Structures are given as C-alpha cells and as structure tokens.
Image: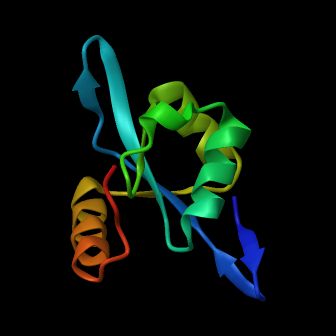
Amino acid sequence: MRALREGNAVTIYVDAMYARFGRMKMSHMITDGDDDELHAMADAIGVARKWYQGDHYDVCMSKRRLAVARGALEIGPHELGAWLRNRRKDGRAHRG
C-alpha cells in the first residue's frame, strides 16, 4: 500500500523471516512513514492491533500475502533487522 503523505510516497514492507508463533508462521510488517500508514494497512488486511509491537506488526502468512497484494514490498529478515535497529536508535520506535 503506497499512501501519500504531503506528496511523498510511503511504503509498507514485509519481511521473509517466517518465525514460528506456536503453530503459526509469522512475518513482520513495517513502514518508512509514520505509524498511521502502518495501522491503515493493518486495518485494510484485517490484522488486529494486538499484533502491533511498537514499531512493527507481526503478521501471519495469509495477511502477509494480502499486504503484498496491496503493494507492500518484500524484504529479507536482515534488511528488516537493520531497519528496526535504526528506527530504535533514531527514537522513532516506541514500546508499550
């Protein structure tokens, strides 16, 4: 989903980590914009707010496919890890 914010494209990303959460395989979804765009994508694909982790969403494989169908870009788990570290270092991520 590419949202427009003051004329700039905002991109949603999903990684290919495929972590296990019980029996479910999960990926992560993050944005290069503010969290409003991230929440909008989560709402659009039916992801509950309880999966929001302060700077990303945990999404199951079916929701990941829906996000990609809506324009989310796929990135590797190492790219996402670096992205999250940078957001946290810059103070853009919050917990709680």
Q: Position of residue 9 (x, y in %)?
A: 69, 79
| Residue closest to the far top | 23
Q: What residue do we see at 59% from left, 68% from top?
A: 11
- Number of numbered markers: 0
| Image quadrant in which you'd find residue 18 | top left
Q: Who is closer to the viewer here, 15 or 88?
A: 88
Figure check: 62 above or below 6: above
| Quadrant of res 67 | top right
Expressed as whole percent of the image width and height from the top left, the position of residue 96 reads: 34, 49
Where the N terminus falls, by quadrant? Answer: bottom right
| 90 sits to left or right of 63 | left
In terms of depth relative to the viewer, which is nearer, 31 or 78?
Answer: 31
Relative to 15, residue 92 above or below: below
Name the residue at 46% across, 29% down. 61
Identify which residue, 33 or 74, lies in the foreground.
33
Residue 23: quadrant of the picture: top left
Left or right: 96 as drawn, with respect to 81: right
Left-right relation of 25 to 67: left
Residue 69's place in the image compared with 2, above or below, is above
Residue 73: x and y, percent?
A: 53, 59
Q: Residue at x 44, y 35 (%)?
A: 51
Question: Percent x, y for residue 32?
Answer: 50, 73
